[in-house]
Image (cartoon, helix red, strand yellow):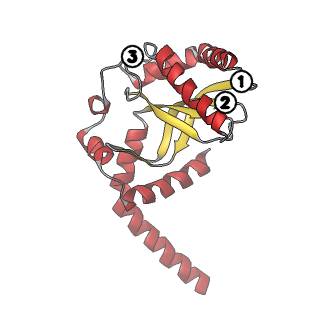
Amino acid sequence: MRKRRLFVVLFGVFMILFSVFQPFISTSEDISQKIFRLHIIANSDSTYDQDIKLKLKNYFLTETGELFTKPTLEENIEIAKENRGYLENLCNSFLKEQRCTYLASVAVCEEFFTTRLYDDFTLPSGVYNSIKITLGRGEGHNWWCIVFPSVCMSACSRSMDDYLTDEEMELVNNQYTPKFKIAEIYEKIKYKMNY
């Protein structure tokens, strides 16, 4: 009987919190469905492997800057899928030039990302489409940026406010708040249940 009461109380608290935070969570989910990310995972956390990751990032952005310039998210994802082999060869050619003993694998997939705070914007947690580059064992710290709308590609002149609603831009431009953590917990649970 006591467990039942506890369950009812906890369920009630959860429902109240969920209803209060649902608009924030919905806006966060909408944002994650409009952004295409580049995600590079280093072989390890050694200084050498982290340096290779950052050099590859610069090389990749320079070599692919003209590739992801389509006006829609779907078109840019399709370009990434159609060119996955090319992107993987590009990364592996770079690694060979650097005399690395490991290779890169490239996937175009959906991934869960935690909330990320930057100087001028906060990107909420959620499941995002991404180009995922795994170097070797993929056991090191990662690096990421936004491919669409272009934040890390210099060839594109459009920004996030060309694609996000005013409400979404307001959320992105906010500083980190406890709401982001609550949304992150919700999104993480949802992701684990679905993937």
Q: Which of marks 2 and 3 is nearer the N terminus?
A: 3
Confirm or deny contact between disc 1 and disc 3 (CB under 8 A).
Answer: no
Q: Position of residue 122 (x, y in %)?
A: 37, 46
> Image point 59% across, 32% down: which residue?
51
Mark earlier in primary sequence (2, 1): 1
Q: Give the secondary structure at mark 3.
A: loop
Q: Which mark is residue 52?
A: none
Indicate left or right for 93 with 150 as reference.
right
SS at circle 1: loop
Alpha carbon of mark 2 to alpha carbon of mark 1: how far? 10 Å
Task: Identify the residue position indicated by label 3 in the image.
Answer: 70
Residue hosting label 1:
100
Quadrant for residue 95, please give it.
Answer: top right
CA distance separating discs 2 and 3: 27 Å
Give the quadrant of the N terminus.
Answer: bottom right
Q: Which of 184 and 11 is in front in this view?
A: 184
Left or right position of 164 against 146: left
Residue lying at 49% horizontally and 71% vertically, measured from the top left: 11
Q: Position of residue 85 (x, y in %)?
A: 63, 15
Vertical relation: 138 (above or below) 184: above
Marks 2 and 1 close (CB-CB < 8 Å): yes
Tag 1: amino acid: Cys
Q: Where is residue 121 in the image (x, y as percent from the top left)?
A: 33, 43
Label 2 sits on residue: 135
Q: Nearer the viewer, residue 134 or 28?
A: 134
Q: In which quarter of the image is residue 20?
A: bottom left
